[in-house]
Image (cartoon, coloured by chain):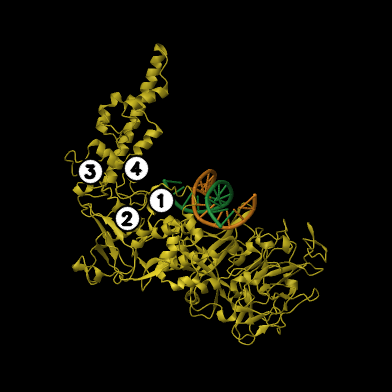
Chain colours: A yellow, B green, C orange
Amino acid sequence: MESRICMNELCGALIAAAGGFRKGWALRSGGFAKLCDKCGTVYEQLAFCELFHLEDTGWRECTSCGKRLHCGCIASSAFVELLENGGVNCVRCSNSFKHKSSTSEDKPDECGISVENSVGEIRSSVKMFKQSCDGTGYDDDASTSHMKQEEIQTTSTSISIYNATSESAHEPNVKYREITGVKDVQTELTIGLASSSSQNPVFFPTEERELSKPYSSLQHGPWAPHILPRVPKSIFPQGFDANSSMSSQIRVARPPVEGRVKNQLLPRYWPRITEQELQQISGDSNATIVPLFEKVLSASDAGRIGRLVLPKACAEAYFPPISQPEGLPLRIQDVKGKEWLFQFRFWPNNNSRMYVLEGVTPCIQSMQLKAGDTVTFSRMEPEGKLLMGSRKASVCTSIQDSRISAMHNGINTIENISNMSDYSNLLQSLKRNTDSHLNLLSRNVNSPIGDTKSRADSSFQPDKKRSRNIGSKSKRLLIENQDALDLKYTWEELQDMLNPPIMHPSIVTIEDHEFEEYEEPPVFGKGSIFTLRSSGEQEQWAQCDSCSKWRRLPVDFLLPAKWTCQENIWDQSRSSCLTPDELNPRELEQLLGMAKGNEYHKWRNSMSHKPDQEQGPSGPNQTEQPVATTTKHPRHRPGCSCIVCSQPPSGKGKHKPNCTCTVCMTVKRRFKTLMLRKQQRQSEREAEIIAEKGQLKLGPAPNKETEVKQSTSSSGKGQLDLNVDPHRVQDNHASTTTHAISMMSLLQAANQPLEMYMKQNGLTSLISEPQASSGSQPLPQASPGPTTPTVQEDEPQGPNHKDNGS
DNA sequence: GTGCTGCATGGGA
DNA sequence: GTCCCATGCAGCA
């Protein structure tokens, strides 16, 4: 058994992991402490404020007004006012609590909290504050303890779990169990001390504690300070500023002031929850909500994988300690009162941990969250229940966050923000901000209904960290790829996308720069869906904010934030909410289905580039088939002819076997061609074998590579025909021994733009409509093409290719 | 082929 | 250089 010297230099007792920490006691607040039996030095303690709170625990209740005071940890410091003498004041009645010191002889039956720092630093210390508990709070007069020390002595394993289910939380005799095997225990309110394992006990004196070490041995020792800035009472009357102003949001989420920098939560995790949101969460109950932290959902968080990566510091500070990667099941209640069960666990990662909540997908979907939105974690007091809220990445927050970001960047102060109009300030802040930040905003402008790509969503993240994501991973974003180019909106373009609610701004001159000042903040356009008719004509569909019906609008109409049927000036017959939907349910479903993956910038692209007017699926019975941007591949737009986009949809909505749409016909033809080619290769091999046999007699066979080279050059500039006309293939079979396949030629064939191919081959458009050839690369009407698509888009093309088969 | 799981990788602070 | 964490990805079911 490993022995250790007591870290208390004045003590120096040799303490064994097995027996040295004989004295352990549970906090009513749900934590444990262990101390040297000789000197009383506490080695590990869970400050209750940093974990779940049990009902009636974790609080001090003002004996005068009943207002619950918190111990003063970062998470809930809103409720205390520090006193110069180290005490805390009830912010309501100013009744203060005494600072009680303790000695080694004065060991507490249960842990209390003391405030021992006159400059606002609160330390949770077992030694210095003796309190008993009567179950209603922390009352010095209480003499009874529901927890007998004998019951709670830690053993050599030093691992205990305080099974704090709602029932047991009130029971005098609280059950304990070993942490091993607790995975199956649903520990909604489990408080535990993941102390050092029996195999590897770790104890650190304060100075040596490293925050990267497991939770158990860190942060929650008696010396672990929860440092708070001293907050003037006047600005902090109720814990949270009733005005959900930016400053109040920042103030609510105070980080530790100094010292253990690593222990500080990064600003991006500070909860910016507003009073309004708090009320929404708490509902009608009298419960107090303690905002813990928040996180902007990344693409992975919001993805289907169902794992929400938790900031390490937050996870370790506010979630129960876990010592095994499997972690614990965790119940978290959403704002609707629905409880979700997640698995809170971690992955070992570079000598550290990555904390994740698993199984969040249903919850994320229920909240209709996507990347870029924010999830907030709070704790309901006194129950200690974990709560999960959310905030959409709305324009408002982005404006606000932009301000915050700008301020963080030293761009604007609160003062000059207040001096400027919101709009002007936003513009100014944004304009001065990085291009990426700007682009992030712009990319989401007028984004259509439905899920957009997660990357785009994540790019909407306002703060600096998030904004840098867009360009961080080279794999994710090559600057020259199409997506990146799509991001390159100019500032002027972005301004165009802002739809000020009134059209006549007043002009304000600030530092020789003129700004348009609007009475109301700018809004981004309402989402809409862009479709392509069989005629090639683009149109826009917007949903009435009043009746939710979808109306057809001109494609170039920029929607305001709110739009109703009454504003449908283009179609008087449908300028009333009483007018039925233009689309039948099926069409509507189709439209909405296609909204997924549709993105403004793609529409914009198609507008600016005068899109490739290739037709989507359109048959004789589909006189009007809206074509949204493809979701198959992020770079592809309607009409993209690449091999990816030509594939039939997989999964839901798969085309029927007898479907004769362009895509299906293409695939069928390709398949046929592929089979023919396979046969052809087989024939080639056979012929080769025969030839080789013959060569054995006549002489050495030509190098295969040479053969390939020769054959490639003879088959039209090295291009490969994946979709050669079967008949021609048949006809030319005799001479196709020269056809060879290489990966490069396959790729070339697959990437051959349809338009180029058609142009080079003098083929007509795939669609019969004349508009279809009005793309950026007009397709010559070399011959009166058939009205049914002539699909040969993948035939091999060299720049001078004339005839594939011959 | 698809989805899940656990870990690895690498950019950025 | 260290740490965090978003995401990639191999292995597996």
Q: Is residue A577 visible?
A: yes
Give whichever of discs 1 and 2 has the lower sequence position.
1
- Alpha carbon of mark 3 to alpha carbon of mark 4: how far? 18 Å
Give whichever of discs 3 and 1 has the lower sequence position.
1
Q: Which residue is mark 2?
A: A604
SS assignment at label 3: loop
User: Hey, what amino acid is under mark 4?
Assistant: Ile
Q: Is residue A259 above or below residue A475?
A: below
Q: Position of residue A226 (x, y in %)?
A: 65, 70
Q: Which residue is mark 3?
A: A765
- Alpha carbon of mark 1 to alpha carbon of mark 2: how far? 14 Å
Q: Position of residue A77 (x, y in %)?
A: 60, 74
SS assignment at label 1: helix
Q: Residues within 10 Å of mark 3 (few under 14, many from 20)?
A: many
Question: Residue A101 vs residue A563: left or right?
Answer: right
Give whichever of discs 4 and 1 has the lower sequence position.
1
Residues under numbered marks 1 and 2 in contact, where contact means CB atoms less than 8 Å apart:
no
Please, which residue is most extreme toward the bottom here?
Answer: A64
SS assignment at label 4: loop
- Alpha carbon of mark 3 to alpha carbon of mark 2: how far? 23 Å
Tag on residue A484? Answer: 1
Give whichever of discs 3 and 4 has the lower sequence position.
4
Q: Which of these two is toward me, A304 or A502? A: A502
Q: Is residue A168 above or below residue A446?
A: below
- Alpha carbon of mark 3 to alpha carbon of mark 1: how far? 29 Å
Question: Residue A707 vs residue A40: left or right?
Answer: left
Q: Are marks 3 and 4 on the same chain?
A: yes
Residues under numbered marks 4 and 1 in contact, where contact means CB atoms less than 8 Å apart:
no
Tag on residue A643? Answer: 4
Q: Chain of mark 4?
A: A
Q: Is residue A80 above or below residue A717?
A: below
User: Hey, what amino acid is under mark 2?
Assistant: Arg
